[in-house]
């Protein structure tokens, strides 16, 4: 995926067109826009709040805010990043509210047995393990890695969505990748 200065070409243009039509009162375009945004936003929110039921509640609030505030979007090319910004804010608020009652140990994965050496370098179990490994990272790195590698946002889109400088996105990506490498190496008995 290219790291250009704007939204990714594939989804960005379609979303921009739908947003522009929805702002003009096209209800069908608004419904299509929400359908396009819903699955990736749900996954993003769930990555932040952790609980499926909480994620569904936050998603509904996010989509409602997207509907209410769509008229404020000036550059339709950034509607995806704008929606992620709303989703991130709402998810972080929800996570803060529930964090006191639900804490998970950061090193619960450390007791997992190392896979046999004869397994391929990338297998379905490792791919399935990735979201859980991401959950062990600090929130800043976790959000940036999820948005980049699981949701396909570009670095500029992530910066826009999280309202942070592009350099911060890059440093969080680098930190998160390094942390994942360390945890995977430690999980396999490597150093």
Image: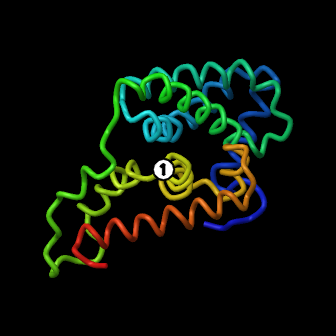
Q: Nearer the viewer, residue 171 or 162?
A: 171
Q: Which colour style is shown? A: rainbow
151 in relation to 122, above or below:
above
Q: Nearer the viewer, residue 157 or 168?
A: 168
59 displayed left or right of 182:
right
Q: Nearer the viewer, residue 172 or 61?
A: 172
169 in relation to 37, above or below:
below
4 displayed left or right of 59:
right
Question: x and y percent of residue 152 in the render?
Answer: 56, 55
Q: Which residue: 68% across, 58% down? A: 168
Q: Which residue: 73% across, 44% down? A: 163
Q: Residue furthest right?
A: 74
Give the quadrant of the C terminus. Answer: bottom left
According to the image, label 1 marks what residue?
138
Q: Residue furthest bottom?
A: 118
Question: x and y percent of residue 21 in the render?
Answer: 77, 30
Q: What secondary structure is marked by label 1? A: loop
Question: x and y percent of residue 61 in the render?
Answer: 56, 20
45 in relation to 68, above or below:
below
Give the quadrant of the N terminus. Answer: bottom right
Q: Which residue: 29% across, 55% down? A: 128
């Amino acid at each position: 995926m290219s790291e250009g200065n704007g939204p990714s070409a594939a989804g960005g243009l379609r979303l921009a067109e739908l947003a522009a039509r929805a702002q003009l009162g096209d209800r069908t375009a608004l419904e299509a826009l929400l359908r396009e945004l819903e699955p990736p936003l749900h996954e993003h929110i769930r990555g932040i709040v952790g609980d499926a039921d909480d994620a569904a509640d936050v998603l509904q609030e996010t989509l409602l805010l997207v509907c209410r505030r769509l008229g404020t979007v000036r550059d339709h090319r950034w509607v995806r990043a704008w929606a992620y910004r709303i989703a991130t804010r709402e998810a972080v608020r929800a996570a803060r509210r529930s964090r006191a009652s639900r804490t998970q140990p950061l090193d619960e994965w450390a007791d997992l047995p190392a896979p046999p050496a004869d397994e391929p370098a990338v297998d379905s179990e490792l791919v399935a393990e990735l979201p859980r490994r991401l959950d062990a990272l600090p929130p800043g790195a976790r959000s940036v890695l999820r948005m980049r590698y699981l949701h396909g946002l570009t670095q500029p889109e992530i910066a826009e969505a999280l309202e942070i400088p592009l350099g911060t996105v890059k440093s969080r990506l680098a930190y998160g990748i390094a942390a994942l490498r360390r945890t995977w190496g430690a999980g396999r008995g490597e150093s």
